[in-house]
């Protein structure tokens, strides 16, 4: 990491009781018949769950992880050839356009494009073909799992057609993105300190769902309904699924878009890879009629394009959906 500029304002969070390791994270075995009801319960209560028997080949996972580590191990000057992440490419410390800063460097990529942009090519040099094929294999596996999970959500909610959510991902115009985050180990300010530096500040993901996989380094925390934070024990062979803002709206608030953050680890580096399932830009994001059951929509209607326009420039911690909430008539 390059040295800190005067404008950078890192944030620290205290290691309070609630952030001690919690094993209460909902666990879904995709090979079991109860998967759909467990998914629905988890999305209602937490907006978050862990998936095993996900079907993504471990070899594809390890190969992408090692390609990513090779990339992040390069000198900063080489990595910067793939930047700035505006909107896609290599980014360092600065997240989004609203001035957020974190102890993180990352690659942001589009999922439905050939990864042969001049910026990425120059950073990957001779290795770009290998990177491209490893990335495609990983993304194919994750897309398949995402489709299965989205269909199980529709089945669990008893809504037709079964592909009401997954068709948005399968659409060739799907605005999905892929992100690889690298959080270098971050020594504490003082030896006995119980504070950790923020790697990625608290936020909700704007898309439908996000499928996250990391190495075995802790750091991810989710916020519960009562506002407390719990740490998610890392598991390099599983995936973690977040409900995003768009799915909260499509279920008229039944599923919860989970607030989450990453704290930097004092001794080990964390590498995470996240596939964000986004709808096509022209898609109307509104509660599904079959989930309304005579209730009013909690949200004003908007397209994904409008939502993206309204949020990019916001601060990470902002309540982005607030702008689209309907005030209930008294
Ligand atoms: C501060 C921001 C960064 C972000 C765009 C935003 O204005 C608000 C949402 C952020 C987020 C969170 C999930 C994903 O990591 C991300 C790529 C996304 O789609 O929304 C990031 C955006 C980003 O890093 O540019
Ligand atoms: O890197 C992680 O573990 C999570 C990062 C995250 O929430 C995001 O990129 O939106
Ligand atoms: Fe996120």
Image (spheres, rainbow, N blue to C red):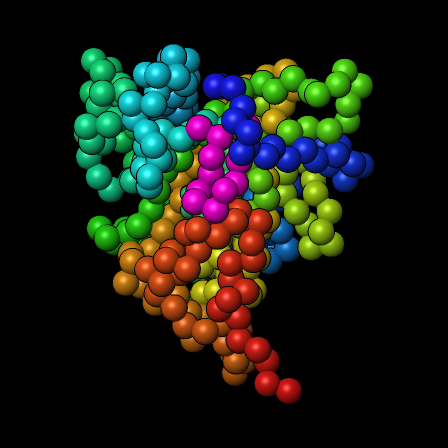
Residue at 33 percent across and 46 percent down: it is: 176
Measured from the top left, where is residue 58 in percent x and y? 41, 23
Q: Indicate the quadrant where residue 19 lies.
A: top right
Q: Is residue 257 magenta?
A: no
Res 134 seen here: no
Name above or below for residue 316 compared with residue 233. below
Quadrant position of the C terminus in the picture: bottom right
Name above or below for residue 284 compared with residue 312. below
Q: Indicate the quadrant where residue 234 lies.
A: top right
The residue sitting at the front extreme is 6
Measured from the top left, where is residue 35 in percent x and y? 52, 48
Q: Is residue 93 magenta?
A: yes
In this rendering, position of residue 308 left or right of residue 222: left
- The kind of secondary structure the magenta stretch mainly shows is strand
- Which residues are drawn in magenta? 92-103
Residue at 45 percent across and 70 percent down: it is: 287
Residue at 41 percent across and 59 percent down: it is: 310
Q: Nearer the viewer, residue 7 or 78?
A: 7
Please state the total of marks drawn on the protein image: 0
Name above or below for residue 304 compared with residue 187. below
Measured from the top left, where is residue 316 in percent x and y? 53, 47
Res 17 seen here: yes
Measured from the top left, where is residue 129 in percent x and y? 20, 20
Residue at 70 percent across and 43 percent down: it is: 229
Q: Nearer the viewer, residue 27 or 283?
A: 283
Q: Nearer the viewer, residue 314 or 236?
A: 314
């Amino acid at each position: 990491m390059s040295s800190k500029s005067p404008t950078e304002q890192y944030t620290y969070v205290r290691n309070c009781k609630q952030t001690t390791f919690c094993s209460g994270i909902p666990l879904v075995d995709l090979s079991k018949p109860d998967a759909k009801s467990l998914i629905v319960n988890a999305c209602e209560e937490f907006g978050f769950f862990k998936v095993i028997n996900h079907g993504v080949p471990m070899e594809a996972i390890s190969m992408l992880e090692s390609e990513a580590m090779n990339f992040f191990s390069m000198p900063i000057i080489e990595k910067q050839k793939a930047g700035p992440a505006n909107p896609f490419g290599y980014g360092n410390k600065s997240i989004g356009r609203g001035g957020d800063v974190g102890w993180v460097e990352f690659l942001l990529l589009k999922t439905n494009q050939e990864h042969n942009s001049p910026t990425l090519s120059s950073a990957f040099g001779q290795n770009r073909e290998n990177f491209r094929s490893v990335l495609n294999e990983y993304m194919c596996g994750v897309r398949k799992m995402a489709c299965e999970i989205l269909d199980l959500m529709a089945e669990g909610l008893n809504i037709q057609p079964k592909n009401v959510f997954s068709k948005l991902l399968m659409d060739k115009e799907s605005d999905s993105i892929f992100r690889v985050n690298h959080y270098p180990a971050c020594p504490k300010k003082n030896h006995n300190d119980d504070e950790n530096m923020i790697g990625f500040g608290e936020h909700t993901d704007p898309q439908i769902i996000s499928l996250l996989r990391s190495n075995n380094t802790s750091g991810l925390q989710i916020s519960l309904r009562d506002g407390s934070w719990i740490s998610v024990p890392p598991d390099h062979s599983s995936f973690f699924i977040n409900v995003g803002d768009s799915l909260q709206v499509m279920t008229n608030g039944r599923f919860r878009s989970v607030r989450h953050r990453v704290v930097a680890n004092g001794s080990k580096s964390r590498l995470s890879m996240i596939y964000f399932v986004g709808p096509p830009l022209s898609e109307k994001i509104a509660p599904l009629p079959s989930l309304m059951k005579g209730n009013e929509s909690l949200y004003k209607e908007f397209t994904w394009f409008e939502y993206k326009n309204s949020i990019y420039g916001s601060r990470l911690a902002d309540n982005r959906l607030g702008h689209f909430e309907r005030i209930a008539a008294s």
